[in-house]
């Protein structure tokens, strides 16, 4: 158990809809990272927050957004969903500010868009 | 540009055999970090090792060992006396120095099957 929690575990929705994925980092970690894992693209970094501020951006679509709240939990919002957004979405956390730190991953949220 | 190549898509070995998973990386930085993660069938990603570019010492942790060679830009992972519980997808990853556009790049992964 990494100490990172993600909810929900599974999400099934329809095209065009909007969903919110939630992540709670390990106790004491200030950074939260979001990743998408799909068969086509593999494991891709989406976005990172550190202590409430956006720190780094990866291959995140404009339809996707995220935020980190004062209690350090984070939410990833996916809107205008398309079939291709079906994937496993991971959240990870680390103590420091950068990708060079060790990241601990949550169990993931499996999103299915029908 | 960063790149991580795991040329072995899938490997099957019989239990108790040794197996090496290859990882070749590309970077123009002199300071970078390399990682290995394990993704068992349950789906979560489990951290295995983090190594910085200035530390070329090989590392051993139980049945796991890592061979870092800057001359060939490789960071290979060996499992000795493999067990069925080692069956998983293994990812190698690279992160460059902090003053760059900070990202981590994962390889496509190697799916390892340990046959009883």
Image (cartoon, coloured by chain):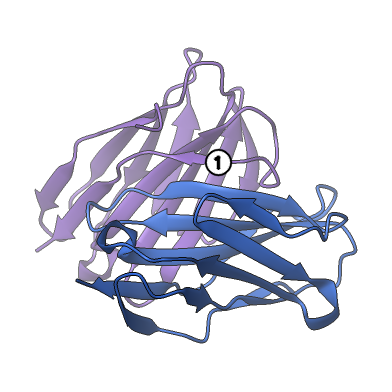
Chain colours: A purple, B blue
Picture residue at 51% right of the left edge, 13% below the top = A70
Please, is residue A21 above or below residue A15 in the view? above
The quadrant in which the N terminus of chain A is found is: top left
Which quadrant of the figure contains the C terminus of chain A? bottom left
Between A2 and A49, the one lying in front of the other is A2
Residue holding disc 1: A103
Q: Secondary structure at mark 1?
A: loop
- Of residues B73 and A94, the one nearer the viewer is B73
Q: Which residue is found at the position 53% from the left and 62% from the top?
A: A59
Across and down, in percent, residue B91 comes to 48, 65
x and y percentages locating residue A41 in the rendered image: 41, 73
> In this orientation, does residue B25 appear?
yes
| Residue pictured at 41% horizontal, 41% vertical | A91
Q: Mark 1 Cα within 10 Å, few/some/many (few <14, many 20+)? A: many
Left or right: residue B59 compared with residue B19: right
Identify which residue is drawn at 53% across, 72% down.
Answer: B107
The answer to whether residue A41 is above or below residue A104 is below
Along the line of sight, the residue nearer the viewer: B110 or A40: B110
Compared to B101, does A76 lie above or below? above
Left or right of B111, for residue A15: left
Which quadrant of the view contains residue B112?
bottom left
**x%, y% of residue B84?**
26, 63
Q: Chain of mark 1?
A: A
- x and y percent of residue B32 in the render? 79, 58
> Going by the picture, which residue comes out furthest to the top?
A71
Foreground of the two, B116 or B49? B116
């Amino acid at each position: 158990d990494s100490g990172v929690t993600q909810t929900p575990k599974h999400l099934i929705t329809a095209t065009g809809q909007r969903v919110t994925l939630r992540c709670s980092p390990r106790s004491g970690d200030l950074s939260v990272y979001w990743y998408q894992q799909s068969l086509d693209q593999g494991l891709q970094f989406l976005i990172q927050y550190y202590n409430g501020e956006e720190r780094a951006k990866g291959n995140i679509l404009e339809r996707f957004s995220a935020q980190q709240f004062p209690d350090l939990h984070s939410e990833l919002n996916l809107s205008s969903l398309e079939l291709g957004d079906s994937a496993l979405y991971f959240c990870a956390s680390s103590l420091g500010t950068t990708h060079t730190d060790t990241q601990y991953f949550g169990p993931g949220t499996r999103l299915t868009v029908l | 540009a960063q790149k991580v190549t795991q040329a072995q898509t899938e490997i099957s070995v019989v239990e108790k055999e040794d197996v090496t998973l290859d990882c070749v990386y590309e970077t123009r930085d002199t300071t970078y970090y390399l990682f290995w993660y394990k993704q068992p069938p349950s789906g979560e990603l489990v951290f295995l090792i983090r190594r910085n570019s200035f530390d070329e010492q090989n590392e051993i942790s139980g049945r796991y060992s890592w061979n870092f060679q800057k001359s060939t830009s490789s960071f290979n992972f060996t499992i000795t006396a493999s067990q069925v519980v080692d069956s998983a997808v293994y990812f190698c990853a690279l992160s460059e120095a902090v003053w760059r556009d900070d990202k981590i790049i994962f390889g496509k992964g190697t799916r390892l099957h340990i046959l009883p």
